[in-house]
Amino acid sequence: MAAFVAELLFDLVRTLVGGWLRQAVVAICAWLDTKIHGRAARFVVGGLLGIAAFFLIPVIAGLLGL
């Protein structure tokens, strides 16, 4: 029974944090879009953010135990 409740709590937290995190990322990207001018700069910043996400997402997922 405890494992069942724990799974429900983990799903609830994942849903709440996932929605909040998605909204935060969209807000940051919208703000960043107004600060960067030029197509080449956008490609560079997008590539750097993509590389950072490629390495950070597995680290964060590992720390959270997903």
Image (cartoon, rainbow, N blue to C red):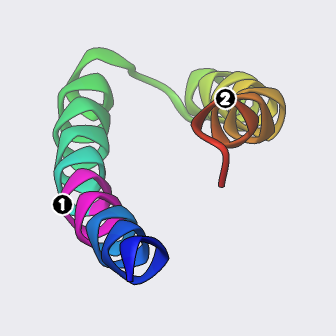
Q: Position of residue 8 (x, y in %)?
A: 31, 78
Give the amino acid at mark 1: Leu
Position of 56 relative to 18 (above/below): above
Q: What residue is drawn where x is 38% and y is 83%?
A: 1
User: Which residue is outermost to the front?
Assistant: 1
Q: Please provide the residue range marked out in magenta.
A: 12-18
Mark 2 Cα shell of 10 Å, populated few (<14), some (14-19), many (≥20): few
Q: Does residue 2 appear to the left or right of 13 in the view shown?
A: right
Mark 1 Cα shell of 10 Å, populated few (<14), some (14-19), many (≥20): few
Q: Position of residue 28 (x, y in %)?
A: 25, 30
Give the amino acid at mark 2: Leu
Position of 8 relative to 23 (above/below): below
Q: Which residue is mark 1?
A: 16
Q: The residue tagged with tag 2: helix, strand or loop?
A: helix
* Number of numbered discs visible in the structure rendering: 2
Q: Does residue 56 appear to the left or right of 42 in the view shown?
A: right
Q: Earlier in the sequence, mark 2 or mark 1?
A: 1
Which of 4 and 44 lies nearest the eye of the viewer? 4
- Mark 2–mark 1 Cα distance, whole angstroms, equals 18 Å
Quadrant of the rendered structure where residue 29 is?
A: top left
Q: Which residue is mark 2?
A: 63
Q: Position of residue 30 (x, y in %)?
A: 21, 40
Q: The residue tagged with tag 1: helix, strand or loop?
A: helix
